[in-house]
Every structure is written in C-alpha cells, then in structure tokens.
Image (tube, rainbow, N blue to C red):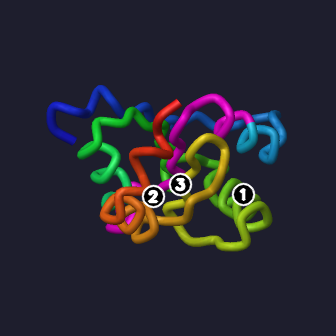
Amino acid sequence: MGSQSGKITRSSKMAGSIDIQQFIKEAISKDKVVVFSKSYCPYCKLAKDVFEKVKQPIKVIELNERDDGNTIQDNLAQLTGFRTVPQVFINGNCVGGGSDVKALYESGKLEPMLIG
C-alpha cells in the first residue's frame, strides 16, 4: 500500500471464544473506520484506496485471512442485510461497499463523515 501502509491496521487473529456478534460490535465501535474486506477483492481495494487518498487511518479485517471469516461474514449479513464485501463502517454505521465509498468521496460527502 505504499507509504501509507502504516495507516492501515489489519486484524488477522481469530475471535476465538468471543461471540462473533460481540467481536463485530467491538470492532466497529473502537475505530472511526472499519473495513471488513477480502484481500483479493477489487471493490475492497477500491474502498481502501479511497481512505488512503483522504489520509484516513482505517482498521481492515481481512475475512479470507481468518479462520472465522465466513462466520463473521454471515453475522455481518444479518446485521447489514448484505453479505458482499467490503462492508465499510464509519463511526459505527455501515455506509455500504466499495462503490458506495467511492460515490461518497466523489460527491464530497465522505470527508465530513470522517470529522469528529
């Protein structure tokens, strides 16, 4: 990710005995921006690139690098109503996927969401 790689925090540990829903709730409440991603997904890269462009640190949880990634993805689907990745949360609210983040950025609506 170039010189901005220090701005992205990755989580590849398994949630273990922690309830998956609790893991998701804690993850999206701890960081301003959380991206549930798959490392090979072009839409996930699109979302991560937008945040790199605006120099916003993000927490990335690469589901394909976790033993419990499918379970997390199933639980996200129950929470958000969609199973696709990325699932991007800003201030605890799901704002959609890669195309949604790009559209927010291009419309000038993304950066105000990141303030505060």
> Is residue 36 inside the magenta stretch?
yes
User: Gap between marks 1 and 2, in whole Å?
Assistant: 14 Å
Residues drawn in magenta: 26-43
Tell me the quarter of the picture where residue 52 sits.
top left
Q: Which residue is mark 3?
A: 88
> Is residue 91 inside the magenta stretch?
no
Q: Are marks 2 and 3 in contact (CB under 8 Å)?
A: no
Q: Are marks 1 and 3 in contact (CB under 8 Å)?
A: no
**Residue for point 64% across, 71% down:** 83
Q: Which residue is mark 2?
A: 38
Q: Position of residue 45 (x, y in %)?
A: 32, 58
Few, some or many residues within 10 Å of mark 2 (<14, 14–19, 20+): many
Assign a secondary structure to mark 2: loop
Q: Position of residue 95 (x, y in %)?
A: 57, 59
Residue in front for this viewpoint, 86 or 72 = 86
Quadrant containing the N terminus in the rendered view: top left
Residue in front for this viewpoint, 39 or 107 = 107
Vertical placement of residue 70 versus 16, above or below: below
**Residue for point 28% across, 52% down:** 49
Few, some or many residues within 10 Å of mark 1 (<14, 14–19, 20+): some
- Indicate which disc, 1 or 2, sits on the residue closer to the N terminus: 2
Under mark 2, the amino acid is Lys
User: Gap between marks 2 and 3, in whole Å?
Assistant: 12 Å
Q: Position of residue 71 (x, y in %)?
A: 72, 57
**Residue for point 65% across, 36% down:** 27
Under mark 1, the amino acid is Thr
Assign a secondary structure to mark 1: helix
